[in-house]
Image (cartoon, grey):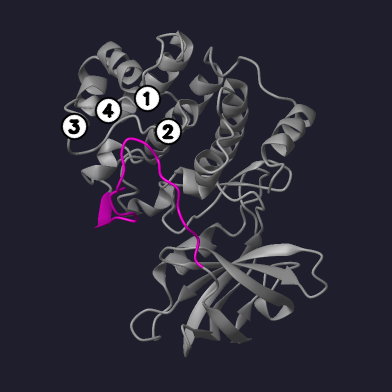
Amino acid sequence: MYQSEGTEDEPLPDSLPFLKKKSFRRCLLASTTGSEELKLQHSVLMKDLKLGRRIDKGKCLIFIASSVDEKTKYALKVFPYSNDSKNICSYFKNEIQFKDLKHKNVINLLGFSDKVSMILNGKMAQASYIVMEYAPYSDMYRALTEFDIFQNDEILVRTFFHQLIEGLEYLHLNDVYHLDIKLENLLIGDDFNLKIADFDNSAFKKQGKIRSRGTKFYRAPEMVTNRCKNFSKADIYSVGIVLFILRSGGYYPHTEEDPYEGIDLYGLLCKNPEDFWKAQFALQSRSSKFYSRSFRSLVTAMMDPDPEKRPFINDIKQSLWYNDKIYSKEELLTVMKSKYSNL
């Protein structure tokens, strides 16, 4: 049986089932000096960059950076040392295992170092860092909560879902399993390509165990109970959650613990999917036509409580809903530029 170390990345969201906006903190980094740079071919290193504001908060620090001539932007992910600056962060060591992944729907790692001296919160400290391609349109969480890009646009949902499936298929073909698929880990690049990011809890098939129990309300039930044997099917469940959230405009399909407004949505999903969807229509005050039968069928299959009954990626790609209309590259550019016109 696969073992989990039992950590959890995210606290319980304070508003369910609807997503809330997040605030972004400003840069906490004052100055840097680098040492012991570990190079990739044609790598980008921190000593060659100008650092800007902080763009994310969490267990790591992420900053916008730019080339000296300011023509190219990057994302710099900093991992402070643990135990009073004595030990390299385990998240960094795990994430750089996936440095060779190259796909248009996977974030590109451009350079890294395991040890650098920098000023963090006014004190000199040791840290590691990764330089990644910059995604100027942030993540799917912000796209949904701040820009509401998917409102009344099922074709756009399906278009990005195609990109997510293509990226996930590439990972799985390379025996890589993300194990923390969620809106915040799905970035939008400057070409409006979805980018799967944040591999600090990911695993290779050969590793045999997982580092984390994932993120609440996105993770598969076997992740909750530390009984995850099939990594690929755990990813499929999380992708099903993401698909539901995008199509619904921000609703989680179910909670993990307490019923929502007296309704045990997860229990309904397990025992009677038809009643689950009836409850969703009622809770969201929507017509039964909003979620097509083909959409309901696909999402229900992806979120099956039994991982062995969930579809393989090839099954998803052959499903009726998946094979409906998507935007061409040119159409996507037009649609997305209009939605981000005020950015």
| Mark seen at residue 310 | 1
Callouts 3 and 1 close, C-beta under 8 Å: no
Of the pair 298 and 204, the residue shown nearer to us: 298
Q: Which of the two marks, 3 or 1, is nearer to us in this view?
A: 3
**Does 337 appear above or below 298?**
below
Disc 1 marks which amino acid? Arg
Q: Residue beneath label 4, please?
A: 305
The picture places residue 22, in percent across and down from the top left corner, at 45, 53
Q: Residue at x 60, y 70 (%)?
A: 53
The Cα–Cα distance between marks 4 and 1, rounded to whole angstroms, is: 8 Å
Q: Which span is picked out in magenta?
A: 3-25
Q: In this view, does 212 lie to the left or right of 198?
A: left
Callouts 4 and 1 close, C-beta under 8 Å: no
Which quadrant of the figure has residue 238?
A: top left
Disc 1 on helix, strand or loop? loop
Of the pair 166 and 161, the residue shown nearer to us: 161
Q: Which residue is drawn at 29% across and 48% down?
A: 14
- Disc with the residue nearer the chain's start (3 vs 1): 3
| Mark seen at residue 236 | 2
